[in-house]
């Protein structure tokens, strides 16, 4: 009976977010909120990378210290005494690559600033004129 109460949705309409309109896409506030959310997600990813690196490193030390019979003499998959398996660097390099891609997406995915917009408009005007004359901004 308790499960039945949890799964029944009689008379309750699901809450859905409003559909984004064309006006929302250029609204400075919504663009700023999207950027803030992307930066927060990036910070979470960086924190997860830091904690994950510590946890994976600890696991690697505990596992390989016991298998190798002491501290590492070399990184190797041969299984000889003193060998430490090199799986951790591969995992961390791959994770760092994903983190770098995330950082680049945040940096290049941000909305353009007013200055960038003005510079691009002026460059377009110069191109339309066939390169004749220079605008004030281009002269600086």
Image (tube, rainbow, N blue to C red):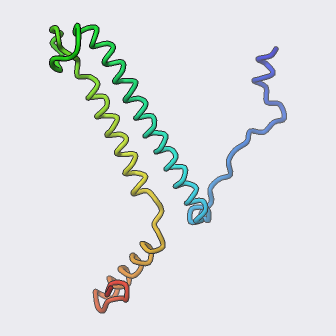
- Residue 54 lies in quadrant: top left
Is 116 placed left or right of 25 in the picture? left
**Residue 18 image position (x, y, % from top left):** 68, 52
- Residue at image coords 34%, 34%: 95
Residue 74 vertical position relative to residue 47 in the rendered view, above or below: above
Q: How many marks?
A: 0
Residue 82 vertical position relative to residue 11 in the rendered view, above or below: above
Is 20 placed left or right of 48 in the picture? right
Q: Nearer the viewer, residue 1 or 86?
A: 86
Residue 91 vertical position relative to residue 29 in the rendered view, above or below: above
- Residue at image coords 40%, 34%: 50
**Residue 15 image position (x, y, % from top left):** 73, 42
Q: Nearer the viewer, residue 130 or 105?
A: 105
Residue 58 vertical position relative to residue 134 in the rendered view, above or below: above
- Residue at image coords 40%, 55%: 107
Is 77 placed left or right of 5 in the picture? left
Outermost residue toward the right in this view: 11
**Residue 108 image position (x, y, % from top left):** 39, 57
- Residue at image coords 31%, 31%: 92
Q: Quadrant of the C terminus?
A: bottom left
**Residue 116 image position (x, y, % from top left):** 42, 72
- Residue 120 lies in quadrant: bottom left
Q: Quadrant of the N terminus?
A: top right
Is 34 placed left or right of 133 in the picture? right
Outermost residue toward the front in this view: 71
């Amino acid at each position: 009976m308790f499960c039945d109460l949890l799964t029944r949705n009689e008379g309750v309409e699901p809450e859905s977010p409003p559909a984004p309109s064309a006006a929302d896409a250029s609204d400075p506030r919504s663009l700023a909120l999207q950027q803030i959310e992307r930066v927060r997600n990036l910070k979470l990813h960086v924190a997860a990378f830091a904690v994950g690196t510590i946890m994976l490193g600890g696991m690697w030390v505990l596992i390989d210290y016991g298998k190798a019979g002491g501290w590492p003499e070399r990184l190797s998959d041969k299984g000889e005494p003193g060998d430490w398996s090199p799986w951790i660097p591969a995992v961390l390099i791959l994770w760092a690559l994903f983190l770098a891609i995330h950082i680049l997406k945040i940096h290049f995915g941000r909305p353009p600033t007013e200055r960038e917009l003005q510079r691009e408009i002026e460059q377009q005007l110069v191109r339309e004129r066939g390169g004749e004359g220079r605008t004030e901004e281009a002269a600086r």
